[in-house]
Image (cartoon, helix red, strand yellow):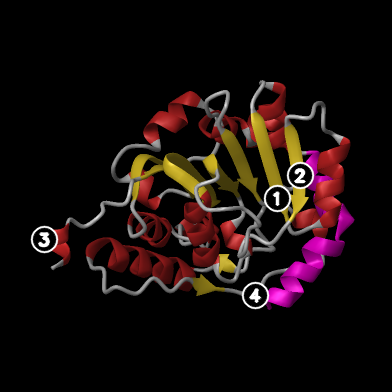
Amino acid sequence: MEEELQRFYKTSRSYFVKLEEKEFEKWFLKYHEHMKAHEKGLILDVGCGAGQVVNKLAADGLTAVGIDISPIGIRLSHKARSNTRASFIVANCYKMPFRDNAFETVGCFDVLEHLTSPELCVDEMIRITADNGKIVIASPNLLCPIYAKSLKSILRSMKITLQRLVKFDGKLDFEHRQPILHDSKHIGRDFDAVTLTDLVAVKRILTGKRVKIAYQSSYLGSRKLIDVLSTLPLLRNIGGGIFLVGRKMRKVLETPSEAA
């Protein structure tokens, strides 16, 4: 399935043209605001698509890099580039071509659900984020009942979510499904998603790697009232989105006495 997914994203121009047409204020504004870093800090957008966020950050005077597995997406991103503060690279998110601790802010928007092994991508994001740097993850919560197609799938999604919230057994295996990769008109409705991303799993991957969660919401958009409501304790765990912002904590070195 991984090869089939990569082939689709590398060859489907219509997919990225649709991404390019997405309205910035509606889709990317909140993510863009959380991705902002200090003037001298490097920012990386993983799975940058058609490059809207990276180009907007560059227009704001920040230095930003976008990577995507698709040469088509990278070409469209370059075409829209307004200044040299934006850079784009064809790269695989499972093995990013950057040194450890290279970026002040690293984020991904609507990416994890399109990966068969999202945990590997998150590990790489953490690796290349500087100590005290910011990690931003936005994704649909595909275990939310609003994505279910039948009563049976609704009950199953609720059961998995409650089990993960109430009792953690150490396993973070994601649920998977067969994606639809042949009909580009469905873009934006997650028909091409292969992994049922859920908040508990993504959050525990981050916290298990020394990332302290600073902000959590179940809303990816920019409407202020909905944004506030989506941060309430219950709604932020069961809503239709995953929006997490965390800080990578410094590794505490053992003292000689502790090591002994």
Q: Amino acid at mark 4?
A: Gln
Name which residue lies at 76% across and 44% down.
88
Q: Is residue 3 left or right of residue 162?
A: right
Instruction: Give the number of the mark in front: 4 or 1.
Output: 1
Q: Is residue 159 left or right of residue 58?
A: left
Q: Position of residue 223 (x, y in %)?
A: 52, 27
Query: What stretch of residues is rendered in magenta?
Result: 1-21
Label 3 – label 4 distance at C-alpha: 52 Å
Res 178 label: 4
Label 4 – label 1 distance at C-alpha: 25 Å
Quadrant in which the N terminus is drawn? bottom right
For marks 2 and 3 on the same chain, the one whose residue lies earlier in the sequence: 2
Residue receiving disc 1: 67
Residue receiving disc 2: 88
Q: Amino acid at mark 2?
A: Phe
Residue receiving disc 3: 257
For marks 1 and 3 on the same chain, the one whose residue lies earlier in the sequence: 1
Instruction: Give the number of the mark in front: 4 or 2.
Output: 2
For marks 1 and 2 on the same chain, the one whose residue lies earlier in the sequence: 1
Q: Is residue 76 magenta?
A: no
Q: Are marks 3 and 4 in contact (CB under 8 Å)?
A: no
